[in-house]
Amino acid sequence: MRDFTEYELEYDKDGLGQKGRGLDRRRPQLYEKPPLKTTGRELFGDDKALELLKLCTSAGLSPEDTIATITRITAKAIIDTYYIWGPKDANGNLDIQEVYTCGSGAFNPNIWDYMQEQLGSNVRICMLDESGIGAKANKAITFAFQAMDAVLGRPLVVPQKVETRTPTIAGKVSP
């Protein structure tokens, strides 16, 4: 968004990408990897964003098509992660009733629409603030929860959801 709005917008709040077509077939191999449980700027930082932007513009995509494509990559990654790591019912189907969102992507109607379409109308998608937790407090609360478990000596990692089968205490207490 910054590149197309002369750094006025950080994210597609109003759905500029809705005017374009998301082109999954243009997704580079980098984004075809299995969904990650966590990631950082090494995979999705400015360098990778510029790489993807150049790929889209060199393919002749308009700004709207580029934003729609990048938005679809983001939305699909979110959905893929739910289907792989989310809770399942006895038949192995995704078993969620609500999804709470926060961050800049939560204001993008393209992401919401795609998520709703993929998860079904029976899943309620809403802002994290509706849960009583302010979105701006999300990370602070998460780190406080992790710190409490470390102090109490409780494993935070759920062995069924990670590569290791050994329960592990995340973090350490230092004087």
Image: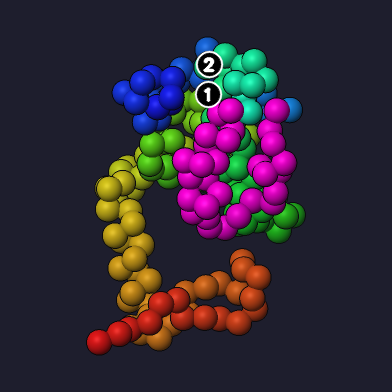
Q: Amino acid at mark 2?
A: Glu
Q: Residue at x 65, y 70 (%)?
A: 163
Prevailing secondary structure class for the magenta stretch in the rendered image = helix
Badge 1 crowding class, 10 Å Cα cut-off, few under 14, some 14 to 19, many 20 or more, is many
Residue 152 located left or right of residue 163: left
Q: Position of residue 107 (x, y in %)?
A: 39, 31
Instruction: Please check the rendered image and state whether residue 36 is part of the magenta-colored stretch, yes or no.
Output: yes
Q: Nearer the viewer, residue 100 or 37?
A: 37
Q: Which residue is mark 2?
A: 64
Q: Are marks 1 and 2 in contact (CB under 8 Å)?
A: yes
Q: What is the C-alpha distance between the residues marked 1 and 2?
A: 5 Å
In magenta, the rendered stretch is: 26-54
In the figure, residue 140 lies in which quadrant? Answer: bottom left
Which residue is depicted at the point 32% across and 84% down?
173
Question: Residue 67's mark?
Answer: 1
Q: How many marks?
A: 2
Spot occupied by residue 158 in the image (x, y as percentages of width and height): 55, 72
In the rendered image of this protein, does residue 47 appear above or below residue 1? below
Choose between 130 and 70: the one closer to the eye. Answer: 70
Which amino acid type is shown beneath numbered disc 1? Ile
Tell me where residue 167 appears, x and y as whole percent: 55, 81
